[in-house]
């Protein structure tokens, strides 16, 4: 075949994309279906029906074929990447029996009495019990077992969203090792399910028999069924090739597989991720995730609610900008980019610590905006949010460098924020290294497509596929003057904000636990 194509399906928090990639890494065609991200039965809850994702996959493929049917005979395989830490309860017929609890859901369950006293003492000894406790409270299977025991009894398999969607595509209940990221009894170092005597096994109340088979990225999960062909027009018999999670696929898709380059994702959750051959935990007991790249791991630092903060800003303060952007025929973010140009580095003294949702290391932390004066306006807040996210990512990258013993000399960026030239320039200035952007904003789809082409033997190795499919733009180079300003702000001011405010946050947390506000 002259121009073989892979169909990459990317299922995110707010949309499904069906994309066709060729062997040169070109995004040949794309169809996108948007949907309401979640519904909330209680404050802090975030759920969505698993079938909704499946229905949107069907519609996305149908739309893609209606608009680009001429390419469908060239499709040689299918691959899938999805958001992480979203699970599906399946009954004995592999049908969903409840809505999925999404990754951003904030409900908690009790961890009291789950761990042996010796294990808890070990966590306390190294100062990681608050992190372990927070992580344990987020185990959604425990919450279901505790609050919906009859439903759990009917649960035959407890799978990731990616596993459920792979099953709907092929009839095979299996998933990629590199998709196994979330609150589930998984040994990330060995890339296998917990054994019963694993020291963290007691944290999970679920039966290990409810888990599912795993395969390596690039392996065939199954074949597209006749039913899917009748629903979408996609040919039955096409192989579904295992890929991995969206963030891991982005890291592969931007070519960040060597130890001198980091992958930065400016997504709903902003992340900085490395690819290492050695298993290195970025924070003690926070695992390094299995990479899509073979025999490798992706240690990662997350800034929860990262670029979601910009959506929050636009919703709360950007009504005028939205109207003006619509009149100009551009996105609101493009219109707001002018603030990034006009306002000086450091937002004229306004600093934001972007911990709208705290991480594991310091679960008591909260977001803060420091340095307001009468001269600041909403544009300063907008720029300070982006600077705050980058400062937090810098902090995360420095931690990863210390842990891995590496020095990062360049960044590859992806996610919605990477579409902005101004964000990329600011990132180069703040990190002090060149910033590269690949040829498509759909980096997770590209990473999944790389897995598929390798799995279909179109390339002899992942390295060969990356060489042919990942293409960088001219890098954004740091401005020395601005880089020095940001370096000083980071060291002298930003790093000190959480330390200074943490005693207050801890008092607030204690009051909240007592029922006070």
Image (tube, helix red, strand yellow):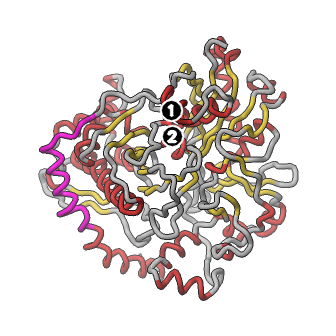
How packed mark 1 is, by other alpha carbons closer than 10 Å (few <14, some 14-19, many 20 or more), is many
Q: Residues within 10 Å of mark 2 (few under 14, many from 20)?
A: many
Instruction: Look at 24% across and 61% down and name the residue there.
Output: 494
Q: Secondary structure at mark 2?
A: helix
Residue nearest the observer in this picture, 454 or 13: 454
Going from N to C along the chain, the mark reached first, 2 or 1, is 2
The answer to which of 238 and 277 lies nearer the viewer is 277
In the image, 497: left or right of 455?
left
Image quadrant containing the C terminus = bottom left
Q: Is residue 375 magenta?
A: no
The residue pinned by badge 1 equals 466
Label number found at residue 252: 2
Image spot of residue 56 (x, y percent)? 66, 34
Residue at (60% x, 60% y) in the render: 188
SS at mark 1 in the image: helix
Tell me where the magenta segment starts and ends, as one range: 476-497
Image coordinates for residue 112, horizontal then vertical, percent: 61, 82
């Amino acid at each position: 075949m002259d121009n073989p194509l892979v169909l990459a399906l990317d299922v995110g928090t707010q949309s499904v994309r069906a994309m066709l990639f060729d062997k040169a890494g070109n995004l040949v065609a794309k169809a996108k279906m948007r949907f309401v991200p979640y519904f909330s039965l209680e404050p802090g809850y975030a759920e969505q029906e698993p079938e909704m994702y499946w229905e949107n996959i069907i519609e996305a493929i149908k739309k893609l074929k209606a608009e680009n049917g001429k390419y469908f005979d060239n499709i040689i395989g299918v691959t899938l990447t999805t958001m992480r830490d979203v699970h599906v309860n399946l009954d004995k017929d592999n049908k969903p029996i409840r809505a999925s609890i999404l990754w951003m859901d904030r409900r908690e369950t009790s961890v009291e009495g789950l761990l042996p006293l010796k294990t808890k003492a070990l966590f306390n000894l190294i100062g990681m019990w608050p992190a372990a406790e927070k992580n344990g409270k987020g185990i959604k299977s425990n919450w279901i077992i505790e609050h919906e025991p009859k439903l759990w009894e009917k649960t035959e398999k407890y799978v990731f969203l990616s596993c459920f969607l792979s099953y709907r595509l092929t009839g095979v209940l299996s998933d990629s090792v590199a998709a196994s990221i979330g609150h589930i009894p998984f040994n990330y170092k060995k890339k296998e399910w917990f054994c019963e005597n694993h020291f963290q096994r007691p944290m999970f109340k679920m039966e290990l028999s409810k888990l599912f088979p795993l395969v390596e990225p690039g392996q065939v999960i199954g074949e597209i069924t006749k039913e899917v062909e009748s629903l979408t027009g996609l040919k039955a018999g096409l192989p579904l090739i295992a890929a991995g999670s969206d963030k891991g696929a982005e890291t592969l898709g931007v070519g960040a597989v060597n130890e001198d380059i980091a992958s930065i994702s400016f997504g709903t959750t902003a992340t900085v991720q490395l690819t290492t051959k050695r298993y290195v935990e970025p924070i003690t007991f926070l695992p390094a995730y299995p990479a899509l790249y073979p025999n490798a791991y992706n240690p990662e630092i997350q800034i929860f609610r990262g670029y979601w903060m910009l959506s929050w800003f636009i919703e709360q303060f950007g009504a005028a900008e939205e109207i003006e952007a619509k009149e100009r025929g551009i996105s609101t973010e493009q219109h707001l980019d002018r603030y990034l140009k006009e306002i000086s580095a450091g937002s004229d003294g306004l600093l934001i610590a972007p911990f709208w949702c705290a991480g594991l290391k310091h679960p008591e932390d909260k977001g803060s905006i420091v340095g307001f004066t009468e001269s600041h306006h909403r544009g300063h807040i907008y720029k300070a949010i982006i600077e705050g996210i980058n400062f937090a990512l810098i902090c995360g990258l420095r931690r990863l460098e210390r842990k891995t013993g590496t020095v990062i000399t360049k960044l590859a960026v992806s996610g919605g924020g990477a579409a902005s030239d101004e964000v990329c320039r600011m990132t180069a200035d703040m990190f002090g290294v060149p910033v590269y952007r690949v040829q498509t904003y759909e980096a997770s789809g590209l990473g999944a497509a790389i897995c598929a082409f390798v799995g279909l033997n179109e390339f002899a190795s992942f390295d060969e596929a990356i060489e042919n499919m990942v293409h960088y733009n001219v890098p954004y180079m740091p401005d020395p003057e601005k880089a020095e300003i940001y370096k000083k702000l980071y060291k002298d001011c930003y790093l000190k904000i959480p330390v200074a405010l943490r005693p207050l946050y801890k008092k607030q947390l204690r009051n909240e636990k007592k029922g006070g506000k």
